[in-house]
Amino acid sequence: MKLGIAARITAIFGLGALLLSISMGGLSYFTTRHFLLAERESAAQHQAFANATLVRSSLGSGDTKYADLLASLDAGSGSHSVLIHKSKAYASSLSLNDSSIPSRLRAEVLDGSAATQTYRTGARGQAEIVVGVPIPSVKAAYFEVFDLADLDHTLRVLGLTLFGAGVITTLFGIALGRFASIRSLRPLAGVSRAAVAIAGGQLDTRLDSDSADRDLEGLTTSFNAMVDQLQVRIEREARFNSDVSHELRSPLTTLSASLEVLEAEWDRLPPRARRALQLLGDDLRRFQRMVGDLLEMSRFDAGSMDVFLEEVNVSELVQRAAEAGMRGLHEPARAPEVIIDPEVRSLHVGVDKRRFERVMANLMDNAANYGGGVTVISVQACPGEYGVEIAVEDAGPGIDPLERSKVFDRFYRGSASGRRGTGTGSGLGLSLVAEHVRLMHGRTWVESSPSGGARFVIALPVFLDSENPE
Ligand SMILES: Nc1ncnc2c1ncn2[C@@H]1O[C@H](COP(=O)(O)OP(=O)(O)OP(=O)(O)O)[C@@H](O)[C@H]1O
Ligand SMILES: [Mg+2]
C-alpha cells in the first residue's frame, strides 16, 4: 500500500527527529561518561599515590601494625585498600582480599609499574576502579579500590533522561510533520473544491490568485487558464448546438407546413406516393422532435433554464401526468395501474408541472417502445435524502446492469433499441429526463422491476410544510 503525502511527510519528520535524538543523546551520554570517568580516575590516582606515600614512610619506619596503618589511610571517597608486603596481603575491609585485585594489574604492579584499571565485579557487576602503586623501597605494593556505584547511578539517570527526551523529541517531530503536511496540503483542498464545483457545472469557479501561496502560483495560474479554456469551449459548443438547432427550425417548419398540404391531398395520391408521404411524415416529425430536444439540451448547457417550482400534491401530480402520458402515446395502450402508498398520499412536492409531465411522458414512451408498455406507476416513500419516489415499471426485457448508468447519457441508444427494431429514437430522451429532474432537485435512476423489466425511479424532495393536511 502506498502512503499518502501527509503520511509520508509525517513519517519523514518523525524519522528525522528520531535520528536526531539518537545521535544527540548518544553523543551527550558518551561524552559525559568519558569525562566523569576520567575525572574519577584522576582523583583516585591522586588519592592512591598519597596513601602509598604514607604507607611507604610507615613501612620504612619498621614495626608496623598493618591494621592500624590501613585504618589510618585517607578513605575519603569510600575506598578500600589492599597492601601486599613481603608476599602477604592485608586489606582494610573484610570483603576484600588479595584475589579482589585483577591478576593482570597485580602482576604489573608487582613488576614495578603503577597501573589503574576500571572493571566490573561481583554478581551485580558493580563498577570499580583499582589503582595499584608499587613501593619498591619497602618491597610492597599498595592497591586502592574505589567503588563507582554512584557514577553508575548518575549515568543510568542520565541515560533514562536522554531516552525520555528522545521519545518526546520524536513525538514532537511527528506532531510537527502532521501539522506541516496538513498546512502544506491545505491549498490543494481549495483546488479540489474548485475542481468539484467545475465538474458540477459551475464553470465560473476560479482559484483566488491573490491569496494563493507563492509556491502554488504556477498551479493556480495554469488551473485558471485551463478552466478558462474549458469554459470557452463548452460555451462555444453550447452556442453551436443552439445555433444549429435554431437554424434547422425554420426550414423544418416550412417542410412540415408543406407536408400538411400534401397530407390534405392524401385521398388523391396513388398508393406509392402515400407510402412515401407517410415515411416522410414520420421522419420529419422525428427530426422535429430531435431538434426540439437538442434545443432544450443547449438551454440546459447554457444554464438559461427558468424553473418555476410549485407546491403540488404528489398523488394528483402523478395521476394527471400518467393520464397525459397515455394520451401522448402514438398507439393506444392498456392503462397502467397507478399505486399510491397511503403514507405519501398527502405529501407535497416542489415541481414544475410541465417538466414533470414531459418526464413522465418520456418514460412512458420508452416503456411503450422498449418494454411492451407501462405496467405499474407507483408512488412511495423514499428512505434517505429524498422524500418520495415515483416509479414507472414495464414488463419488457429490462436494462442490463452494465447499461443502467449509460442510458442517461446523451445519444445513447441501448442494445434494446436495435434489437427490437424500434430504433427510431435519438437517445436524448433519458438524458433530458435526468436534467429536468435535477432542475427539480431530484434524482433519477433505473433498476429492475419485479417482473424483470425496467423500473425507472424519480426521487423528489418533499415539502415539510405543517400547513399541508396529513
Ligand atoms: N423501458 C425500457 N426498457 C428497455 N430499454 C430501455 C427502456 N427505456 C430506455 N431504454 C433504452 O435506453 C436507450 C435510451 O433511451 P432514451 O429515451 O434516452 O433514447 P431513445 O428512446 O432511444 O430516444 P428518444 O427518447 O430521444 O427518442 C434506449 O435506446 C433503449 O435502448
Ligand atoms: Mg426515449
Image (spheres, grey):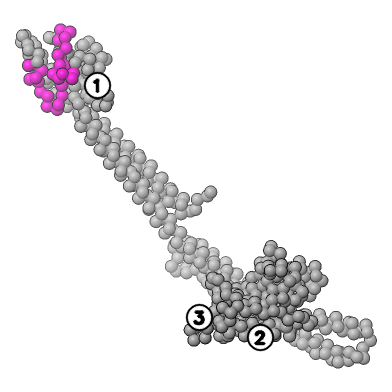
3D distance between C-alphas at marks 2 and 1: 108 Å
Q: Position of residue 86 (x, y in %)?
A: 15, 7
Q: Residue at x 46, y 54 (%)?
A: 6
Residue 365 appearing in the image? yes
Residue topped by disc 1: 117
In the figure, 206 relative to 327: above or below? above
Q: Earlier in the sequence, mark 3 or mark 2?
A: 2
Residue topped by disc 2: 320
| 399 or 283: nearer the viewer | 399
Q: Nearer the viewer, mark 2 or mark 1?
A: 2
| 1 or 445: nearer the viewer | 445
Callout 3 secondary element: loop
| 79 or 26: nearer the viewer | 79
Q: Please, what is the three-letter code of the amino acid marked with disc 3? A: Leu
State the extent of the magenta-drawn residues as a range: 68-96
Total numbered circles: 3
Q: Position of residue 166 (x, y in %)?
A: 33, 43
In the figure, 220 relative to 387: above or below? above
Residue topped by disc 3: 464
3D distance between C-alphas at marks 1 and 3: 92 Å
Callout 2 secondary element: helix
Q: Position of residue 373 (x, y in %)?
A: 75, 76
